[in-house]
Image (tube, rainbow, N blue to C red):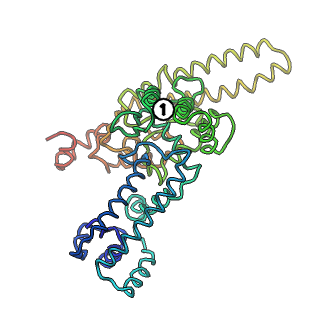
């Protein structure tokens, strides 16, 4: 049955039954299924499934993820795999045409029909999240993986390790890897316990530093040099290039259509002018996370360091004369600008804490991000849109709605039983 469904013949029949991009269960039930069976077809389908599983094992957005494709041979292996899969799919088509006793003339008509594109009248949001077009795009992206893409997969894998999302060496865990137990243990030791890392050179929780350490453990120095150069597009100091990549590029890719589709696993909180950034693994957020970020371990500590730096520079300036005195004015002004930005960041965090913020994983990524939209200047539109929707009452089933608009939500619960059940009021 499965082998007959995923073929040109079944696709043609489904288009006749429902000529849109969204097939329903009822459409599947109406498919004409031949009573003929084939041992060869079952064998071919099994082979195709095993090849498809390899993709899941190498894709961090799946539950089957182990590790990215090999840096040394991954591109070659992918090419070979897709060539083999294409050949098997062609053999499956041939066998299904035979089982349905489809003539050469009818086959030509079917293939000509399938060559015509379906007009997609769905909204952009629907197209982004559903339908075969998206799956086809993902398959094409896998098949056309470049060396730069592969390098960025390894960088993203390293991020997941140091954030504590992936667990190398743990049986059944996400991102469990194929490394030796010794390497896996060293990688697990890099994982941050609270899922908070910072873009701050010299800080013990500096993200670029820890990612570089993870890459070196996994790939060795020479391959790490190649990965960083390919992934960032630059061949300078590795840590500096990774820092710029995380500041400017990584988050945009992370929320993109080929990764997490506007539902990021890692969140980037930044000061208003983006002089300071904090990375969070959202599954490790707790009610104390914002307190920790605003406290002496991160923002408050950085403010103290900048204030000390300014005081030292001012002492030097006051003791200097002429040109040297004037030259010290610029670095003082630069540090003061960063300090003002950090203070504004601290104030925004405090405002959110005063309002109250508790993450609820059942609410989903975007609704949990919404109350923090002011802390996300690099991607503010979507969380702000969701926050406005929360204020309007669009998501009163959510815990965030109850946290921020309890009177309105409780009133709705009196007449809406599903809301009352969601909030434990029955």
Q: Nearer the viewer, residue 227 or 17?
A: 227
Q: Quadrant of residue 181?
A: top left
For label 1, the SS is: helix
Q: Please provide percent x and percent y for residue 388.
A: 40, 47
Q: Quadrant of residue 123?
A: bottom left
Q: Is residue 96 above or below residue 211?
A: below
Q: Is residue 383 above or below residue 220?
A: below
Instruction: Identify the image quadrant of the C terminus.
Output: top left
Q: Please provide percent x and percent y for residue 6.
A: 34, 67
Q: Please provide percent x and percent y for residue 336.
A: 65, 26
Q: Nearer the viewer, residue 425 or 191?
A: 191
Q: Nearer the viewer, residue 342 or 234?
A: 234
Circle 1 crowding by C-alpha within 10 Å: few under 14, some 14–19, many from 20:
some
**Mark 1, residue position:** 348
Give the farthest residue toward the bottom. 105
Instruction: Identify the image quadrant of the N terminus.
Output: bottom left
Left or right of 204: which side holds 369?
left
Left or right of 192: which side holds 37?
left
Q: Residue at x 41, y 26 (%)?
A: 193
Give the farthest residue toward the front. 39
Give the farthest residue toward the left. 426
Q: Residue at x 62, y 45 (%)?
A: 230
Q: Please provide percent x and percent y for residue 397.
A: 26, 46
Residue 344 visible (yes or no) = no
Q: Is residue 99 above or below residue 70?
A: below
Residue 311 visible (yes or no) = yes
Left or right of 180: which side holds 407?
left
Q: Residue at x 69, y 28 (%)?
A: 334
Q: Nearer the viewer, residue 210 or 349?
A: 210
Q: Quadrant of residue 119?
A: bottom left
């Amino acid at each position: 049955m499965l082998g007959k469904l995923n073929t040109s013949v079944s696709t043609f029949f489904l288009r006749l039954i429902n000529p849109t991009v969204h097939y329903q269960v009822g459409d599947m039930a109406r498919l004409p299924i031949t009573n003929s069976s084939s041992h060869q077809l079952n064998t071919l389908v099994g082979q195709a499934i095993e090849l498809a599983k390899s993709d899941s094992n190498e894709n961090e957005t799946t539950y089957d993820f182990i590790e990215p494709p090999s840096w040394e041979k991954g591109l070659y292996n992918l090419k070979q795999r897709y060539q083999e899969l294409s050949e098997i799919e062609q053999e499956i088509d041939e066998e299904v045409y035979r089982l349905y006793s489809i003539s050469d003339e009818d086959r030509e008509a079917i293939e000509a029909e399938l060559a015509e594109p379906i007009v997609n009248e769905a909204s952009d949001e629907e197209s982004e999240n559903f339908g075969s077009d998206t799956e086809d795009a993902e398959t094409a992206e896998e098949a056309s993986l470049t060396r730069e893409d592969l390098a960025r997969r390894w960088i993203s894998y390293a991020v997941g390790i140091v954030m504590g999302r992936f667990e190398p060496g743990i049986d059944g865990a996400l991102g469990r890897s194929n490394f030796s137990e010794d390497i896996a243990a060293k990688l697990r030791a890099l994982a941050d316990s609270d899922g908070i890392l910072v873009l701050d050179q010299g800080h013990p929780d500096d993200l670029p530093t820890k990612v570089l350490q993870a890459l070196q453990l996994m790939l060795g120095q020479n391959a790490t040099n190649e990965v960083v150069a390919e992934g960032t597009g630059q061949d300078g100091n590795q840590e500096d290039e990774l820092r710029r990549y995380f500041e400017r590029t990584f988050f945009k890719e992370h929320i993109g259509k080929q990764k997490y589709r506007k539902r990021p696993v890692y969140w980037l909180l930044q000061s208003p002018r983006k002089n300071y950034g904090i990375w969070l693994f959202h599954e490790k957020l707790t009610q104390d996370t914002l307190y920790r970020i605003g406290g002496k371990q991160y923002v408050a500590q950085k403010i103290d360091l900048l204030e000390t730096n300014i005081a030292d520079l001012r002492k030097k300036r006051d003791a200097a004369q002429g040109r040297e005195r004037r030259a010290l004015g610029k670095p003082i002004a630069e540090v003061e600008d960063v300090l003002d930005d950090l203070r504004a960041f601290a104030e925004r965090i405090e405002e959110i804490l005063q309002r109250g913020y508790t993450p609820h994983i059942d609410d989903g990524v975007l609704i949990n991000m919404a109350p923090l939209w002011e802390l996300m200047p690099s991607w503010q539109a979507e969380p702000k849109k969701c926050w406005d929707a929360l204020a309007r009452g669009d998501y009163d089933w959510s815990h965030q709605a109850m946290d921020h608009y309890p009177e309105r939500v409780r009133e709705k619960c009196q007449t809406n039983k599903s809301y009352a059940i969601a909030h434990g009021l029955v």
